[in-house]
DNA sequence: ATTTAGCACTCCATGTGTTTGAGTGCTAAC
DNA sequence: GTTAGCACTCAAACACATGGAGTGCTAAAT
């Protein structure tokens, strides 16, 4: 691709991101003066279109970047990807070490990203499948209610309030606690399932057997801790983009379900991935772009943070934001883990 | 209002709820045969319109119920408000005593209501302002991290993970715990604020003073527990109603913010309130109807459960659903409280 | 005194040109 | 290789006719 073509493609992409209107040869020159006539631009645009970088809504309309065009722009043409100073400050003031645990940190991160970008923000906790149970706590809350707390080797803390089948006396509680603590601490999360818990209960006799619903609670807790938590912020921002309006409901429902969000991208630590329009494997996202990055905790793969918006999105501005936020979250979580 | 007018108004409301199209005199007769000619219907409709029960989108269109018309229908004309058997089963299978604490029970309730009605569902926990701190627990999670757990006299359980300013040794933790426990148990939630906590810390010396961020954590926790939690489910359902499409973004943002949702209605225990269209005090809801009820816990005012949909909503079906669900949640929470 | 048939009227929705303008592709001259 | 020029295209905007569902009114029927 000639330098001139590159320059023209970049100008079209940038202009289209700004205006959302198809770009014609003449109006392109107004925006980005070049020592060329509109006829030359026209010829170049026709070639770019036949190469697949531009689309044409209809014969006599201007050109619009295709997803291939955006892709080329992002990979090769996009200018400096410096983070805007104002954005950096915003991010830093929202996301700090004081945020407590990973979940609340990520929820702050999602909020600020959605706010800053006018897109939907997705954030996930790190996958906990390989984690090992470090500690279990049981805090009595009432005659039949306890709060179970689980701490994993990866620093994930989960708690759950459970109601027992019968009253929990002090001695019953203590023996139950001792049994599950002894049996489970040091075991990987994915090892724990209801069947095993029941045989465990059976092996120690009737005391623990009276606590079946607590065992179920522990199992659920372990399951929850192994699960990736997906948080979504600012979905409603997407309603402001007319190009997404037609499938607004489908898109919203897709995002709400959240399950597949972890699977949108396929990333290694510290990686950033950008999926533009039809590059997405989910049909609901074919008019959207996804910018997502994975943070690392202590050199290990962590969760992901990213955003979802229309394809016509300011890549040059938003990519560094996602990158910066992801790195920051990774650093904070690494520090928090080291301290424990 | 004559019996005939009542019958006609009811028929119009019901038909309009079904079709969403303005109803004409002739098409009304097709739907609901009466021993009358269309001309008579026309006269009656004209009168109903001049009385304010019907609106007319334009001169030559059919009639649409005004909010006053819906109101009259709901108050006087609506047939039996029996709960559909299928719905009852759905509700019961989703909301049961096993759901653990109040928050997860309410989240189940909201989900099932949103699903069943294709509307947005709102649920709030009971207001905890008058509650008293029953117990505080502090579970160490790491060298600098603890989990604080608060239990109130009204059965609300809240927990929070806090990072201390410095390492928490066993003795430091214990003395901190003893101090706050002694100082706060039995005190009403609204009594607790940061200034008081700091003077408390100052009065007991440097040990507790080293734990300022934990004190802040306790304060926040008390604040959280006093706060009404607002949950929202199924917002995206509202995108399916064309009459809400125009202000979809404003409506979504209004709901997302959640703060005013507790103030939409003004209810006593066991009461149900229905606000139709412009009866709502918030402009964002002027095209919507709200059906909301308050549950009671142990004869005391609890939180609210309800739904938000377009004004064209099947009142006869949905009102009993909300009522039943609210009663059920109240019963379960009352039972849970009694057992503790 | 109601009820109803009949009729003129209204107005949206739909469809059909017509015009306008931004844009294209091509060709021939530079 | 570049550009001026020109014929052509097509969506969007506008005007205009048409049809139909609906109304309100009046006068006759019950």
Image (cartoon, coloured by chain):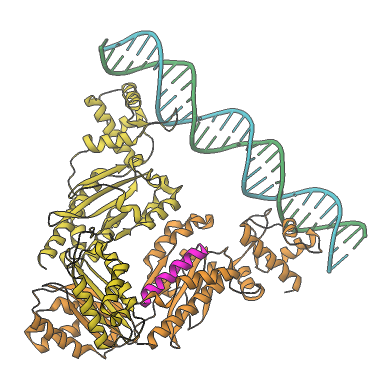
Chain colours: A orange, B yellow, C green, D cyan
Above or below, comparing residue D6 to residue C2 in the picture: below
The residue range painted magenta reads A101-122
> Image quadrant of residue A182?
bottom left
In the picture, the quarter occupied by the C terminus of chain A is bottom left
The location of residue B10, given as percent across then percent down, is: 26, 34
Which residue sits at x=27%, y=44%?
Answer: B274
Seen in the image, is A284 located left or right of residue B38? right
The location of residue B331, given as percent across then percent down, is: 14, 58
Seen in the image, is A163 located left or right of residue B309? left
The location of residue B210, given as percent across then percent down, is: 33, 81
Residue B195 part of the magenta-drawn span:
no
> Image quadrant of residue B45?
top left
- Prevailing secondary structure of the magenta residues: helix
Q: Nearer the viewer, residue A71 or A123?
A: A123
Which residue sits at x=17%, y=46%?
Answer: B82
> Image quadrant of residue B97?
bottom left
Q: Nearer the viewer, residue B14 or A119?
A: A119
Seen in the image, is B238 located left or right of residue A147? right
Q: Nearer the viewer, residue A209 or B297?
A: B297
Residue A105 part of the magenta-drawn span:
yes
The location of residue C18, given as percent across then percent down, is: 69, 36
In the picture, the quarter occupied by the N terminus of chain A is bottom right
Q: Nearer the viewer, residue D19 or B154?
A: B154
């Amino acid at each position: 691709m000639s330098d001139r073509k590159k320059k023209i493609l970049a100008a079209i992409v940038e202009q289209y991101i700004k205006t959302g209107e198809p770009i014609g040869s003449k109006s392109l020159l107004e925006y980005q003066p070049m020592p060329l006539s509109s006829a030359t631009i026209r010829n170049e645009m026709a070639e770019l279109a036949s190469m697949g970088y531009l689309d044409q809504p209809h014969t006599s309309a201007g050109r619009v970047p295709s997803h291939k065009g955006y892709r080329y722009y992002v990979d090769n043409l996009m200018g400096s990807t410096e983070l805007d100073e104002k954005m950096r400050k915003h991010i830093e003031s929202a996301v700090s070490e004081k945020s407590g645990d990973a979940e609340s940190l990520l929820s702050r991160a999602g909020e600020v990203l959605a706010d800053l970008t006018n897109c939907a923000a997705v954030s996930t906790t790190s996958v906990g499948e390989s984690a090992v149970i470090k500690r279990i706590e049981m805090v009595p809350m009432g005659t039949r209610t306890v709060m179970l707390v689980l701490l994993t080797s990866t620093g994930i803390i989960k708690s759950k309030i459970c109601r027992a089948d019968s009253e929990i006396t002090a001695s019953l509680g203590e023996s139950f606690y001792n049994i599950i603590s002894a049996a489970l601490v040091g075991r990987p999360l994915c090892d724990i399932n209801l069947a095993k818990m029941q045989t465990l209960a059976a092996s120690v006799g009737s005391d623990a057997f009276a606590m079946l619903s607590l065992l179920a609670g522990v199992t659920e807790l372990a399951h929850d801790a192994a699960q990736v938590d997906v948080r979504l912020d600012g979905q409603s921002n997407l309603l402001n983009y007319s190009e997404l309006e037609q499938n607004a409901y489908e898109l919203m429902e897709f995002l709400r379900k959240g399950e597949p969000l972890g699977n949108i991208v396929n990333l290694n630590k510290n990686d950033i991935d950008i999926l533009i329009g039809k590059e997405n494997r989910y049909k609901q996202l074919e008019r959207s772009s996804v910018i997502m990055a994975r943070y690392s905790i202590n050199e290990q793969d962590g969760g992901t943070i990213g955003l979802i918006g229309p394809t016509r999105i300011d890549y040059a501005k938003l990519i560094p934001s996602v990158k910066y936020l992801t790195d920051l979250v990774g650093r904070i979580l690494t520090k928090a883990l080291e301290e424990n």
